[in-house]
Image: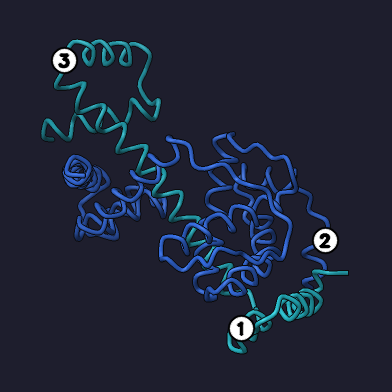
Chain colours: A cyan, B blue
Amino acid sequence: MSTENSIIELAERYVNGQMLPDEQREFELKVQNNAYLAKIVNEFVLLHETMATYATRYSLKNEMNQWHNNIELPEAKLIETEKVTTKAEVETKSKNYLFSMNLLK
Amino acid sequence: MIADIVVNINDSEIIEAFRTDNKSVMQRFYKMNYPMVSHFVIYNGGTDQEAKDVYQEAIIVIYEKINDRSLVLNCKLKTYLYSVCRNLWLKQISKKGKFAGRIEDLEEFLPIEEDNGMEAEKNHLFEIMNNSMLQIGEPCFTLLNDFYIRKMNMNDIAEKFGYTNADTAKTQRYKCMNRLKKIFFDIKNSA
């Protein structure tokens, strides 16, 4: 495995809390005493955190798209196609929709 | 029946569901509140697609705030959701120069504080990651998506990509991470 891959593997195990206590202390000491290693590890930590945000957002977005496909919004579509112009019209159609979905009592 | 599905989930239950990834309750919350936002956006000059985009962005904001424990709720969650959507829609139409100076509200809302620096930085880094992933090419794009988003294990990834074993797949993943790191920091440092 190349040096960069080895560093990434170590950094990944470090941020995931997968190192044994002795190994973790040794790794932290190396990082403290080696500016190049510190730079690579810091970059990896930022990359790892951003990847976590990216993964969370995309996973949730995928879920939401599936949920969205199951939403039937006849009233919303009607509102869009009819180009309603008054607030009262929107409210009426909105209430009709909610009643139709049993979301209003 | 839908009536059975939507009864009585309170805000604490919804927040707990967002914390524990209870997809069933999250889905109910999603479906229950979309009409409110759809009507607001469409009434204020948007399309159903724009309503969907704003709504999903707001759900992500709430999901992240709940999970990093930064959500301060001084109203009903539904009001908070509407307020976030309203804010996002205002920003969007202002950016496009379409804001006519008045928004028609269909619900009560609270003024939402502007993003703090940390949120803005998080969104900025997310955009860089998004662009980096778009540039990375195959097989890295699919491999990283499979691992980080679809949560596939290395054995399944090895089988899917035809690698000898999980270790070979892991080495390939590290290569992809190195490639991603280079693209990511090239974009970040050039901005």
Q: Is residue B140 placed above or below B191 in the rendered structure?
A: below
Q: CA distance from mark 3 to mark 2?
A: 59 Å
Front residue of B59 and B155? B59
- The three-letter amino acid code for the residue at tag 2 is Val
- Give x and y (percent) for residue B169: 24, 48
Q: CA distance from mark 3 to mark 1?
A: 61 Å
- The three-letter amino acid code for the residue at tag 3 is Asn
User: Is A31 positioned to the left or the right of B130 in the image?
Assistant: left
- Give x and y (percent) for residue B182: 16, 43
Query: Most extreme residue toward the front, as rendered?
Result: B101
Front residue of A67 and B103? B103
Q: From where the camera sits, is residue B78 visible?
A: no
User: Is B19 positioned to the left or the right of B183 in the image?
Assistant: right
**Residue shown at 71%/66% (left/top)?**
B106
List the residue tagged with mark 2. Answer: B7
Helix, strand, or loop for circle 1? helix
Numbered badge on residue B83: none
- Give x and y (percent) for residue A94: 73, 75
Numbered badge on residue A77: 1
List the residue tagged with mark 3. Answer: A34
**Residue shown at 77%/65% (left/top)?**
B5
The chain to which mark 1 is attached is A
